[in-house]
Amino acid sequence: MSSQLRGTNARGQSKRSILKRLLGQKAYLISSLKNSRELKIGDYSFPGKTESECRQFTMLLFLLNTAIECLENGVTVTRRNVYYQNVELFRSQYAVDLSLKKLGEALKIDSSLTGIVPGSKGLVIGALRLKCVHPECEVDCSEITVLPGKPVEAKLTADLDSILIVEKEAIMHSLVESGYHQNNRVILCGKGYPDKATISLMYILLHEIEKRPRVKVQIAVDADPHGLDILRVYLRCVPQQYYNRIEWVGSKIDHSKASEVISCTEGDRKRAINVLSTLVDNCNSEWHNHWQSKEWCTQLQRNLFFNAKREMSINDILLGARNV
């Protein structure tokens, strides 16, 4: 059986023990079916009292079989792929996520070790090798690499100069084409709001450079409410001791020419108001007290006042735009 079954979590559950429990549940269901008994998965039963209950049980059964297949074959499948395997049953991606959580609770197992994993979208390139889980693998990041799973270890293969986190994939590709990453730099891209794998890698890299004070950590986002909200998400996930290591680079609305800005949409304005409200509501939190949070408020207010936003360009990074 694949070495992937050797994975364990913090509670001591292994993929092998989870597979054993899933197979036991399946055997119980087959026995109940043969003997015309009520089928049960935890507190969920079939036939249910309503159509909704029957559908919920069917989703759990579908996920049970999918998890067994993944663990027996030592492979993984994304939750998105599970949804597309039976769109008529699940009807939404949220139903897959919720049902997988319910399956884990019903059988008292760690659903993250079932082989049904969130789809990863984060990208990375630089002088490092990653060790990941879900699935277990090691990857070389000398070329642009999609994070295959949750990173648990990063080995730097060169003396690191800086870490750059960018919002957009297009900017990342432009930087790579310019050779930006070749000077002992790591580029990490969350393609918008970062997923858990991207956040995990950021954590690991920050820990790796903890005793390397000269290594710069920069985040480049658009000068619009969504970009500033993404910046807030990253900083909110950063341990307090690293706050002063992070520098916000890229475009800012008050350092832009008229030809570089475009009008905000109604959605932009709503997001700006929501982010400002969040900053005010969390005014006593550690990440909010970071000096740059005051600059965020100023930028968001300018987005609203001028009804304008600006997308960053590669030159904002290559020319070292700071605008602090």
Image (cartoon, rainbow, N blue to C red):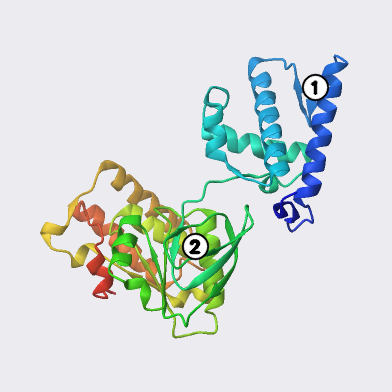
Quadrant position of residue 316 = bottom left
Instruction: Give the Cα distance between marks 2 and 1.
Output: 44 Å
| Left-right relation of 200 to 301 | right
**SS label for mark 1:** strand
**x and y percentages locating residue 171 in the rendered image:** 30, 60
Q: Residue at x 19, y 55 (%)?
A: 306
Picture disc at residue 236: 2
Q: Nearer the viewer, residue 31 or 243?
A: 31
Q: Earlier in the sequence, mark 2 or mark 1?
A: 1
Residue type marked 2 = Arg
Q: Residues within 10 Å of mark 2 (few under 14, many from 20)?
A: some
Residue 159 location, x and y as percent? 47, 83
Q: Is residue 283 visible?
A: no
Q: Residue furthest left?
A: 259
Tell me which residue sits at (23%, 75%) in the image.
319
Single out the mark in the foreground, 2 or 1: 1
Q: Residue furthest right?
A: 35
In the image shown, does 141 or 293 lie closer to the viewer?
141
Residue at the spot of label 1: 39
